[in-house]
Amino acid sequence: MITLNPPVTIAIRTVTFSNLTWTLLDDGRKACALIDGCIKELTLWDGTTTPTYEAIGDYTQAQIESRISELLKNNPAQILSALCFIEN
């Protein structure tokens, strides 16, 4: 165990999203979007998604935007919240 002296308090900040911007991360096996304001990536395509990373091929900007919208459509607040904060 590491003791911090003095203790560190981290305040949870409010994040409001209206226009999403992101950085695309692609390691040749998985493509993710790191949405500005978030600390975790949103997986767009990998070996377990439909379509898979292999099936999507050379994706376009329009496909990236469509996939992000598809993944967020049912509950964007819950998904973005999960991507923005560290779970205890």
Image (cartoon, rainbow, N blue to C red):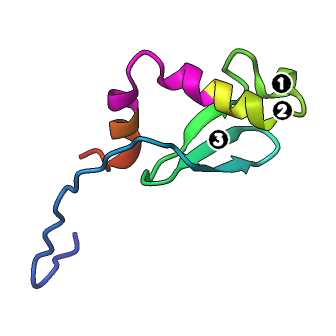
Left/right placement of residue 10 relative to residue 56 reads left
Residue 10: % across, % down = 18, 65
Question: Looking at the picture, which amino acid does disc 3 mark?
Answer: Cys
Residue 18: % across, % down = 41, 41
Q: CA distance from mark 3 to mark 1?
A: 13 Å
- Above or below residue 19? Residue 63 is above
Q: Residue at x 42, y 15 (%)?
A: 74
For this rendering, which residue is in front, 52 or 1? 52
Which quarter of the figure is the N terminus placed in? Answer: bottom left
Left/right placement of residue 11 relative to residue 28 reads left
- Above or below residue 46? Residue 55 is above
Question: Mark 2, residues whose alpha carbon is within 10 Å: few (<14), some, or many (≥20)?
Answer: few
Label 2: which residue? 59
Q: CA distance from mark 1 to mark 2?
A: 6 Å
Question: Of helix, strand and loop, which one carries label 1?
Answer: helix
Q: Earlier in the sequence, mark 3 or mark 1?
A: 3
Q: Residue at x 59, y 30 (%)?
A: 68
Q: CA distance from mark 2 to mark 3?
A: 12 Å
Q: Are marks 1 and 2 in contact (CB under 8 Å)?
A: yes
In the image, which residues are magenta? 68-79
Question: Mark 3, residues whose alpha carbon is within 10 Å: few (<14), some, or many (≥20)?
Answer: many
